[in-house]
Image (tube, helix red, strand yellow):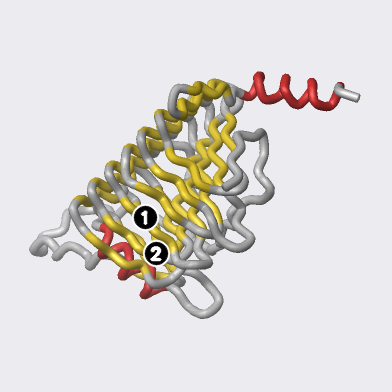
């Protein structure tokens, strides 16, 4: 098995593209004297997008992905109050793109089998989202990839224990200033034909990546952030942007 910590990887996990409906809010004058309306069914589905207004459970999100997927497009789900679940096993049988509008995406002691899965906050304005995976096993089918992408300032991804196994590739991105990625005693595996490998990135201005004894299995492995340190066994690897840039300059200067 080849293993390297590098500035770049040989490819990127392809992000599925979905269209989101435009949402409008309305303000009604006056006071209603009718009995309170029953809560709207969750999720609501419009224009091929399933929207959860309340904190969602993983099985419901999987069902919403299936309900919105078709032969041309992956499932599309919006979480307006995030997701929180624990101690469940769920199968996601279609590719799916999940957008976080606010709140967090938290799983504890969960087993998920899926097709290609994207979790992102890019469709909404600035906020502070967190993705927390504790003792979680996420396993992709033979052609599946995983993209976890936060774009807002102070976004945070925590993966503690468990494993992520996606043959087509794994990309974890926290691009906003002061973003943080924490990996602790977790396994990341991206080994399959044509795999894009493993790429973990945080902001090169103020971002932080800390890896404590992760197990990394891929032909191409890349970590980079402003402050980036990975501990493997008794070896500490500095993957900070300045160090990697210096190494690259030194290599270019070598005859």
Q: Residue furthest front?
A: 1
Q: In this orientation, which residue lies closer to the viewer: 240 or 186?
A: 186
Give me the C-alpha separation between circle 1 and circle 2: 8 Å
Tell me residue 18's x, y (percent): 53, 63
Q: Are marks 1 and 2 in contact (CB under 8 Å)?
A: yes
Depicted 146 relative to depicted 161: above or below: below
Bin the neighbour count of mark 1 within 10 Å (Cα to Cα): few under 14, some 14-19, many 20 and up: many
Is residue 93 shown left or right of residue 229? left
Element at label 1: strand
Q: Residue at x 27, y 44 (%)?
A: 135
Q: Is residue 132 above or below residue 208?
A: below
**Identity of the residue drawn at 21% across and 58% down:** 88
Quadrant of the frame with the C terminus: top right
- Viewer-proximal residue among 26 and 68: 68
Residue at image position (66%, 33%) is: 7
Question: Image quarter for residue 115?
Answer: bottom left
**How dense is the environment of label 2, judged by Cα within 10 Å: few (below 14), some, or many (20 and up)?**
many
Residue 64: x %, y % from top left: 34, 68
148 on left or right of 134: right
Please tell me which residue is depicted at 43% across the width and 27% down the height of the picture: 233
Identify the residue under disc 1.
Answer: 138
List x then y, in percent, for residue 212.
40, 28
Against 226, residue 166 (above or below) is below
The mark found on residue 114 in the picture is 2
Looking at the picture, does residue 45 appear above or below residue 166? below
Secondary structure, mark 2, is strand
Left or right of 3: which side holds 235?
left
**Viewer-closest of 189 and 115:** 189
């Amino acid at each position: 098995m080849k293993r390297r910590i590098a500035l770049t990887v040989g490819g990127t996990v392809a992000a599925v593209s979905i269209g989101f409906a435009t949402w409008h809010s309305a303000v009604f004058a006056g006071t209603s004297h009718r009995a309170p309306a029953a809560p709207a069914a969750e999720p609501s589905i419009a224009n091929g997008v399933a929207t959860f207004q309340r904190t969602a459970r993983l099985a419901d999100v999987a069902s919403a992905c299936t309900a919105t997927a078709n032969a041309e497009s992956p499932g599309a789900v919006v979480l307006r109050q995030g997701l929180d679940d624990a101690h469940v096993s769920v199968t996601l049988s279609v590719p799916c793109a999940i957008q976080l509008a606010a709140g967090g995406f938290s799983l504890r002691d969960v087993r998920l089998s899926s097709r290609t899965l994207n979790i992102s906050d890019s469709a909404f304005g600035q906020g502070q989202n967190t993705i927390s995976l504790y003792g979680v096993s996420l396993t992709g089918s033979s052609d599946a990839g995983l993209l976890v992408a936060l774009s807002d300032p102070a976004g945070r991804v925590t993966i503690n224990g468990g494993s992520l196994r996606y043959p087509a590739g794994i990309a974890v991105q926290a691009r906003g200033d002061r973003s943080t990625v924490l990996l602790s005693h977790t396994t990341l595996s991206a080994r399959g034909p044509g795999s894009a490998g493993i790429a973990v990135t945080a902001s090169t201005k103020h971002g932080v990546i800390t890896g404590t004894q992760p197990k990394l299995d891929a032909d191409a492995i890349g970590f980079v952030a402003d402050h980036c340190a990975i501990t493997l066994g008794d070896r500490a690897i500095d993957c900070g942007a300045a160090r990697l840039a210096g190494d690259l300059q030194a290599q270019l200067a070598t005859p």
